Amino acid sequence: MYHLLEMMKENFSHHIFFSAGLLLIGGYFLGKLAQKLKFPSITGYIVSGIIVGTSGLKLITHENMEMLLIISEITLSFIALIIGGEFSFSKLKIYGKKILILTLSQLFLTFALVSFGLSLLGISGSIALLLGSIAAATAPEVTFVIVQKLKVKGKFVDYLHGIIALNDVGTIILFSVVFTLFTTSISEHKVNIGISVLHGFLEIAYSLIAGVISGLLIHFSNKKKRNLKEIKIITLGILFLTTGICLSLHLSPLIANMTIGMMLINLSKRNLRILFALQPLMAPLYAVFFAIAGSELSFSIFQNRSVLFAGLLFIILRTIGKYCGIYFSAKVMKVDANVTKYLGLGLLPQAGVAIGLVLFVQASPLIENTSMEVQAQIVQMVNIILMSVFVNELLGPPIAKYAITKSSIVKK
């Protein structure tokens, strides 16, 4: 067995097609096994990635991993588009105010609990605030795929889609404010807080504008089209262009593509056929996407006891913040019992957005020139987030599936 693995590493693992095929086949079989064990198939995909990735057999090279991340960007673009497609104005009129209050309640309670709890543990106040702002992030891709697989509908799903979309917008704004305060505290030069916060708002505004323009382009380009193949080509082309432009200009492709979906569904109900045309592409993309996420997870983060303890506290306080923030605000607004009881559990998965914010901190030029002490604190922060993502990638999907199943209507 050992010689077979060595032969595979030496002769095949350098090729991107081998890596992609390995993730697809492994994801398929372990996804089926997960379903038989009453877990969501996502859990199987992630475990397959762990087995062949950096924590397991190491059959995927670093170079191939960087190339495979393109698939992650594509998948997130599709998911954001379809989540946006749930934002019809008719639903917003009914649930809009409640969704906004629920989103803000869980976001700020999570931020406050994590920040305060970690500062009591001895973590620097500014780092604790950064961790608190990142704790607010969720994983819309996980929740969305579970909803799609279970084929559920109803108020619970409407609330869930609304909150996971608004939550990441709120997280970006909150993180922008906190990161500005953090860089001000460590910088030898004065940083204009107002300008930095304005920059965060402009990033969101420009992302929304990009989404509006692209949504209009897709709508009018496909308005008279009947051939689904032509619709698919035009939509994919504009979607890829939008994602590429947003990434190049450091905007949010997640917000831009959600806006495209919202534009399409509200401009015409006929645009549902555009979303329908993309459905055949989704299953293999989901499998590779979550397997890639699993292959990047590393057990090495559990070796440091201080990180282990801080990471566990982070996960517990984040869970309390998400659940209680939804539960108590929903109780006050007299939201349906199923939504009140289970909605917070659907927000526990955490992945791409949190990692993206951590990478942003690491890549900031202001961080590179700081003291060794600050550098060590940043490393500790990164490890805490990675541990949270590791745990929530594995435990979050089955918990979210339980919540969605218990509270939603299953389509027959």
Image (spheres, grey):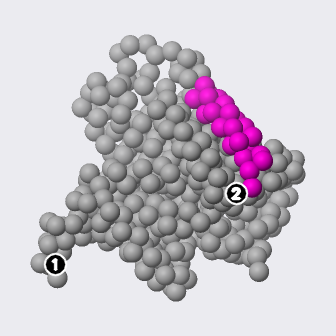
* Disc number for residue 372: none
Label 2 Cα neighbours within 10 Å, binned few <14 / some 14-19 / many ≥20: few
- For the residues carrying marks 1 and 2, which lies nearer the camera in this image? 2
Mark 1 and 2 residues: CB-CB less than 8 Å, in contact?
A: no
Q: Where is residue 33 in the image (x, y as percent from the top left)?
A: 46, 83
* Residue found farthest to the top: 190
Task: Answer with left or right where residue 339 lies relative to residue 107.
Answer: right
In this view, the residue in front, 196 or 334, is 196
Q: Indicate yes or no whether the magenta region holds residue 216.
A: yes
Q: Examine the image and state in which quarter residue 226 appears.
A: bottom right
Q: Where is residue 130 in the image (x, y as percent from the top left)?
A: 47, 38
Amino acid found under the numbered disc labelled 2: Asn
Amino acid found under the numbered disc labelled 1: Leu
* Residue found farthest to the left: 3
The stretch in magenta equals: 201-227
With respect to residue 227, does 8 lie above or below?
below
* Residue found farthest to the bottom: 36
Q: Indicate yes or no whether the magenta region holds residue 257.
A: no
Q: Where is residue 355 in the image (x, y as percent from the top left)?
A: 43, 47
Residue at point 83%, 59% (across, down): 335
Q: Position of residue 389 (x, y in %)?
A: 44, 57
In this view, the residue in front, 123 or 400, is 400
> Mark 1 sits on what residue?
4
Residue 141 shows in this picture? yes
In this view, the residue in front, 290 or 319, is 290
Give the SS element for disc 1.
Answer: helix
Residue 102 shows in this picture? no
Quarter of the N terminus within the rendering: bottom left
With respect to residue 120, does 226 lie above or below?
below
Residue at point 82%, 48% (across, down): 268
Give the SS element for disc 2.
Answer: loop
* Disc number for residue 227: 2
